[in-house]
Amino acid sequence: MDDGRRAASISGTVGVVRVRRPSASGCHRATRRAGAGVPRGLLVAALALVVGPVVAGVALALASTGGATVGVRPAAPEAAAQITAQAAAQTVVEGWDARRAAAYAAGDVAALGRLYPAGSALGEEDVGVLAAYVERGLTVHGLRFAVLDLTVEVAEPDRVVVVVTDRMERAEVRRGDGTPVALLPARGEAQRRLVLERRDGAWSLVSSGPRGPGVTPSEPAPP
């Protein structure tokens, strides 16, 4: 093979690249020119030499931290348990309030009585209030207590003791046919200590101690 053909053959496999500082818009064009004349196998081998150590370094760093993301710490078990207990207690309180509101709206004196232990003076007072409405053909709708703050004293599977700061929303008194009769005024923020126990699968209110002036265990007021 003569020198002319050998030179042509070599020039077809090796490209000459002029190294210049590319602009932001010309980076991709410079990359294409640089690799245009280089065999693909050589490019792959070069990339392996560059990328391989980087991947190995990342893997080594993850292995040294047990695969966890550096700088992120899991929540302390005590804090997580406290949040769970508070959420569970609030669910119990709000669930009991919802059942009481449903009994008032339906005028169901018996259902209201089942929310308290047998012989409970607190329950008898509350039942007496609803019975007075029912005797006049009235029911109370929208009886709702917004929980503003809740502190857990006891959180057991069948017993919950909490100190609750709540606010009674405005409720509506209606006749049996649904005609509105009057609005019960809202009650401002007040604090109560509630003791609830689960008996026969249902939560009962054992005691409700008022923690502020003008707050009585049974609301709304008699008609």
Image: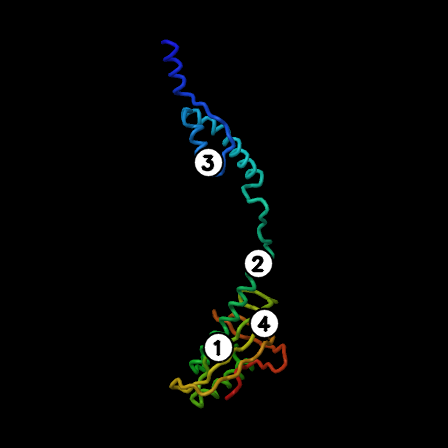
Mark 2 element type: helix
- Looking at the image, do the residues carrying marks 1 and 2 touch, with CB atoms under 8 Å apart? no
Q: Nearer the viewer, mark 3 or mark 4?
A: 3
Q: Nearer the viewer, mark 2 or mark 3?
A: 3
Residue 23 x %, y %: 49, 36
* Residue at 58%, 38% in the rendered image: 64
Kindly identify which residue carries mark 1.
Answer: 100
Mark 1 element type: helix
Mark 3 element type: helix
Question: Could you tell which of marks 2 and 3 lies nearer the N-terminus?
Answer: 3
At label 4, the amino acid type is Val
Q: CA distance from mark 3 to mark 4?
A: 66 Å
**Rendered position, 71 above or below 144:** above
Q: Quadrant of residue 38?
A: top left
At label 2, the amino acid type is Ala
At label 1, the amino acid type is Arg
Specify whether 194 is left or right of 113. Answer: right
Q: CA distance from mark 2 to mark 3?
A: 57 Å
Q: Nearer the viewer, mark 4 or mark 1?
A: 4
Q: CA distance from mark 2 to mark 4?
A: 19 Å
- Crowd rating for badge 3 (residues with CA inside 10 Å; few <14, some 14–19, many 20+): few
Question: Could you tell which of marks 1 and 2 lies nearer the N-terminus?
Answer: 2
Specify whether 33 is left or right of 210. Answer: left
